[in-house]
């Protein structure tokens, strides 16, 4: 049986060996990190080492890292009315139209407090629209992701931050897809809250973090009870998951420059091959003229149904995804592509291929071979449809 190929890194990643080893070691510890006896102190030491590793990766102080159950909880915790960086508290929420659904849901803001920020055809936030929205009311919490999970497009976060802070607002940055793929720091970005997740970089599923800027005030916990995480998130910490998160971050950061240079070369070869196989169908790589993550390709082909392509790749032993959220097994049109103005037909045809540190040149070869067969079948189907009309 041919070995399967996994090209869906933006959905989740294999567990790194370093993370697995750290998790096994942490699972052997019997102490609660909040206990003061020797067993508790041993658990606390593992917890704080992971916190320090994650803080170092984004240029933050360790005390400003709040562990959560994942990226969705980190985003929900960040989207809190009343946040401030020294000025009037923010009581409305501005979110870019291409955010992850967990941000578009608005956290603890009421629907009438939420306004979308439009994006241009590349999927980049329209800074002029943001400036106008900021000037139309009191200070706002603004949420703009660093890198899009579907297209890989990078946002001009530094410019966004300057604009938001000039208007007395607060900036939340969902950096979940960017961690371990591009270098960044919370101060460099100008973010006041930054969301992270473990399973996108080779850590375990079900653990994430919200990193806070040093001027932020007004954060109210989602979970209340004990005083864990300096009172910002109650509940005994997931020590095993957190240990894996810290080890994955350390491993990813140490190998990032070499890994991502190699991955970008493979992605560029993949995209060149996809275009050659197009058979004149008018397909395109989304936002290929825009700064993107080095590992991400989103492809749209008129007349191609995303679920057909995903199933075709799966039958060929290759895991890719549609470029849209999946609900109850049904592929929905991509809200990201619709916000970019591509229209519902193309939004339904998007597939995403995302590479990881484990990807190889032979993976690209097999992916292109599978794509040639899919395109060939699509062209044959169209010819048969034409013949049926006569």
Image: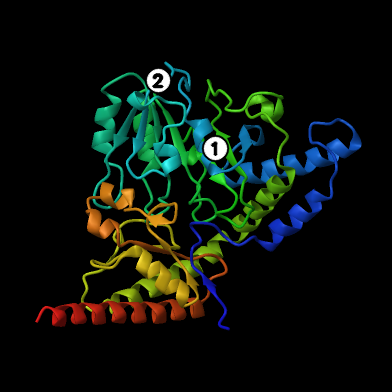
Compared with 386, 36 (above or below) is: above
Q: Secondary structure at mark 2?
A: loop
Seen at 50% across and 37% down, the residue is 75
Residue 134 or residue 13, whichever sits in front: 13
Compared with 222, 16 (above or below) is: below
Crowd around label 1: few <14 · some 14–19 · many ≥20 (10 Å):
many
Seen at 53% across and 73% down, the residue is 5
Residue 304's disc is none
Q: Which residue is mark 2?
A: 91
Quadrant location of the N terminus? bottom right
Q: Earlier in the sequence, mark 2 or mark 1?
A: 1
Answer whether residue 252 is visible to the viewer in this image. yes
Q: With 185 as the anchor, is 351 left or right in this view?
A: left
Corner quadrant of residue 256:
bottom right
Give coordinates of residue 271: x percent, y percent.
35, 71
Answer whether residue 277 is visible to the viewer in this image. no
Crowd around label 2: few <14 · some 14–19 · many ≥20 (10 Å):
many
Q: With 62 as the anchor, is 182 left or right in this view?
A: left
Quadrant location of the C terminus? bottom left
Residue 28 or residue 1, whichever sits in front: 1
Seen at 50% across and 63% down, the residue is 260
Mark 2 vs 1: CB contact within 8 A: no
Q: Which residue is mark 1?
A: 74
Compared with 255, 154 (above or below) is: above
């Amino acid at each position: 049986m041919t070995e399967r190929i996994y090209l869906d890194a933006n959905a989740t990643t294999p567990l790194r060996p370093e993370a697995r080893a750290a998790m096994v070691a942490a699972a052997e510890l019997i102490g609660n990190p909040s206990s003061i006896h020797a067993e508790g102190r041993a658990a606390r030491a593992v917890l704080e080492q992971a916190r320090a590793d994650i803080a170092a990766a984004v240029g933050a102080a360790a005390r400003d890292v709040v562990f959560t159950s994942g990226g969705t909880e980190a985003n929900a915790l960040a989207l809190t009315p009343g946040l401030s960086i020294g000025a009037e508290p923010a009581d409305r929420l501005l979110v870019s139209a291409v955010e992850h659904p967990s941000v578009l849901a608005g956290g603890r803001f009421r629907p009438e407090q939420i306004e979308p920020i439009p994006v241009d055809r590349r999927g980049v936030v329209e800074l002029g629209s943001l400036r106008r929205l900021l000037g139309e009311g009191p200070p706002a919490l603004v949420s703009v992701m660093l890198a899009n999970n579907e297209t890989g497009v990078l946002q001009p976060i530094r410019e966004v931050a300057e604009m938001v802070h000039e208007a007395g607002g607060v900036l939340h940055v969902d950096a979940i897809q960017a961690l371990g793929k591009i270098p960044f720091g919370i101060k460099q970005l100008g973010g006041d809250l930054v969301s992270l997740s473990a399973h996108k970089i080779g850590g375990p599923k079900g653990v994430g973090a919200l990193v806070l800027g040093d001027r932020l005030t007004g954060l109210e916990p989602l979970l209340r009870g004990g005083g864990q995480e300096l009172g910002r998130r109650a509940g005994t910490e997931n020590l095993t998951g957190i240990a894996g998160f810290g080890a994955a971050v350390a491993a990813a950061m140490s190998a990032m420059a070499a890994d991502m240079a190699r991955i970008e070369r493979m992605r560029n070869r993949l995209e060149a091959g996809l275009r050659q196989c197009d058979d004149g169908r008018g397909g395109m790589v989304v936002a290929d003229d825009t700064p993107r993550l080095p590992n991400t390709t989103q492809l749209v082909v008129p007349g191609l149904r995303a679920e057909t392509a995903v199933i075709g790749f799966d039958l060929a032993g290759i895991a890719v995804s549609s470029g849209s959220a999946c609900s109850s097994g049904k592929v929905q049109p991509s809200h990201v592509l619709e916000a970019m103005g591509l229209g519902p037909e193309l939004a339904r045809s998007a597939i995403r291929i995302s590479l990881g540190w484990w990807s190889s040149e032979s993976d690209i070869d097999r992916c292109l071979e599978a794509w040639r067969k899919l395109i060939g079948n699509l062209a044959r189907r169209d010819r048969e449809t034409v013949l049926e009309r006569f």
